[in-house]
Amino acid sequence: MKKYFFKQLYHFKIELNELSLDNNNVDLLLKIQQRLLSWHKSLEDFSHRRKKRLNYLSKQKKDPNNSKLNSKQIKKSIKICVDQLDELKVFKLWARHLGNSIPHLYYDKGDLRAYSYSVNSINLKELSGDLFGKEGQDLELEIFYKLLSEGYKTLLNDLTSLIRHADIMVMEREVPFLMEVKQSKATSKTAERQIQDANKIGEYLLKDNSTEIRGGAISKRISASVKEISNKYLINKNFKNSKKDGYCFSKIEDGFYCLSHLSGVDPSQINFSLIENLEKPFFFLLNQFKNQEDHSLFYPYSLSIDDPDIFANFLCGNFLIYFIIDWKIIEDKAELEKLTLTPISEFLALEILSDSSPPLYSYTLMKAIVEFTSVHWALNELCNIYASVPLEFKNLE
């Protein structure tokens, strides 16, 4: 199955690279989404067959006439089915993460995140189920193909785990146009509510604050104090050298390093002299992070990693990426700002404390590392964001 997964990733990335050079290429935009639709169809069909097989085996297991050998074989087959279904869940989620790449070619990542949240709670809006077999899909696809044929840059929202409101997004203007597709008049009330929800997201993006989304909580967008600084070039240079030599260990910026290597490389061959003098090295394994965290709100790896071969091998677990940060630079920055920054997860979610305020929590450093952004920029931004939080929120008990 991973061989099929690898080939799909590789060819998807080649086409995505082409689209990133010319995001007005509507034919290529359509081709990429057709590839994703085909992939979803294959994964869903295989998943349905595995579920039928599992149901059949579960019934067979209960047969009192089974011999010990037969029972053992059935249990083994059940385990294979369960493992395959678990693997398919991961592949189906990653297919959506690939879809997240498309809107990022047209809109700022800070704007896109608003489309992931529910308007009724502080949580992400629940993802739809399977793409195929749902009511109204034929009409949805008909409208989708019609818009693309007329030259409109159009996205099927179900292909993403990012755009969770409406069915279709037309990406022609500064604020995208969302379309909700319904066939039955009986669903008009539901459609009306969904359209109102999408409008609330648009209002939030226009006004930068709202109490109409995320369950009525106060939501406010804060502009970056300085332009984001990217490490993408240096990190991809590291990957390129690693592909050629088997591994690469390089300094990305003061106190921040990248180690990447092919899965077959013997760790004893790697020269760690670059970090021998670090006072408090902190290791961040990107492979482990991508397998444990929801990636809906992160800038896609398919856009951060340039090389199609490296990208496909990374997602398939054949190319390992470590980031190493000297925790001393965190402590020095915190001391300068009279703050205490404490990691509360292995992936660098931080608790921020000061003498005069209750704790606040930040994912800024985590996001910077995952999105190949400067760690020093992230630390400055984290402190600036903390300073900009209104006093009344800091004093809430």
Image (cartoon, grey):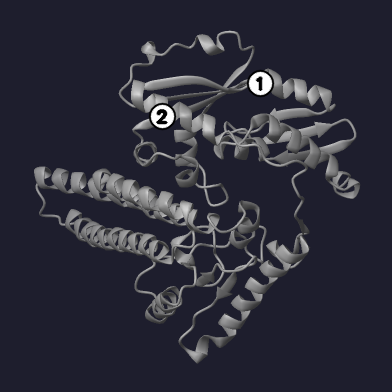
> Is residue 338 shown above or below 6?
above
- Report x, y in % for residue 284: 53, 28
Q: Where residue 327 is drawn, which disc sits there?
A: 1
> Is residue 245 shown above or below 19?
above
For the question of whether residue 210 can be seen, the reply is no
Q: Secondary structure at mark 2?
A: helix
Front position in the image: 255 or 162: 255
Q: Secondary structure at mark 1?
A: helix
How many numbered discs, if any? Answer: 2
Work out how far the residue at label 1 is from the one at label 2, CA to CA, in angstroms. Answer: 27 Å
- In percent of the image, x 23 and y 46: which residue is there? 80
Q: Is residue 203 left or right of residue 97?
A: right
Write down the residue under mark 2: 240
How many residues crowd mark 1 within 10 Å: few (<14), some (14–19), many (20+)? Answer: some
**Viewer-nearest of discs 1 and 2:** 2
> Is residue 136 shown above or below 42?
below
Front position in the image: 342 or 208: 208
Q: Is residue 195 left or right of residue 384?
A: left
- In percent of the image, x 38 and y 55: which residue is there? 92
For the question of whether residue 220 can be seen, the reply is yes
Mark 1 or 2, nearer chain start: 2
Q: Is residue 141 left or right of residue 293?
A: left
- Report x, y in % for residue 291: 44, 40
